[in-house]
Amino acid sequence: MSDSIKHISLGRRKESTARVRLSPGTGKILVNGRAFENYFIRETDRIIVMQPLTLTENAGKFNIVAKLAGGGLTGQAGALRLAISKALLATDNNFKDILRKNGYLTRDPRMKERKKYGLKGARKRFQWTKR
């Protein structure tokens, strides 16, 4: 594919949504207009986001502009990882096997369970008294 083409993809996890624009560059990552290191404070979240880039050896080859919305920081990191993986797949189809094998192309289906009526939360009940 041509190097000047931008690849746009979407990733979701829990309540978070990530929209990513991947373009050839020097490895600069912007998240909601802020530097990647300033947005993700925890080192684990930064590692999660960088996993598909390091696995495919593209860590310094693409500039990434991401818009994140909803959820918490860890959910957003997971959504961003999925979006980056999908965008990398659009650049080169040879990455499919390695990304799929490591689970980076699979959306994490776990969501918050809804609250049920008559209960305190999704599963917690009010205390039962015999008398």
Image: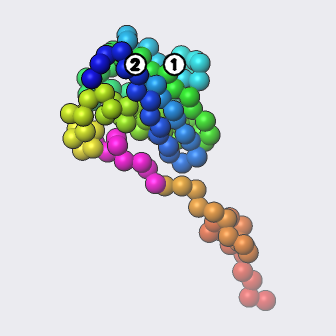
Q: Residue furthest right?
A: 131
Q: Name the residue located 72 percent from the left edge and 72 percent from the top edge.
A: 117
The residue tagged with tag 1: helix, strand or loop?
strand
Q: Is residue 90 visible?
A: yes
Picture layout, residue 54 above or below residue 70: above
Disc 1 residue type (three-letter) = Leu
The quarter of the rendered structure image containing the N terminus is top left
Nearest to N terminus: mark 2 or mark 1: 2
Residue at 51% in and 26% down: 66
- Residue 74 lies left or right of residue 24; in this view the side is right
Q: Residue 57 at what x, y percent from top left?
A: 25, 23
Residue at left 53%, top 16%? 35
Tell me the chief SS of the magenta region.
loop
Q: Position of residue 94 (x, y in %)?
A: 20, 33
Q: Is 49 in front, or is 4? A: 4
Question: Which residue is disc 1 drawn over?
Answer: 30
Mark 2 touches mark 1? (CB < 8 Å): no
Mark yes or no: residue 49 visible: no
Structural crowding at the residue carrying mark 1, measured as other residues with C-alpha within 10 Å and reported as few (<14), some (14–19) or many (≥20): some
Magenta segment includes 73: no
Residue range in magenta is 102-109
Residue 11 point in image, percent of width and height: 47, 40
Query: In the depicted view, which residue is nearer to us: 61 or 49?
Result: 61
Q: Where, by quadrant of the figure, is residue 5 drawn?
A: top left
- The span from disc 2 to disc 1 (Cα, nearest Å) is 12 Å
Q: Which amino acid does the dot numbered 2 rest on?
A: Ser
Q: Which residue is mark 2?
A: 23
Vertical order, 2 against 103 (above or below): above
Circle 2 sits in a helix, a strand or a loop, which is it?
strand
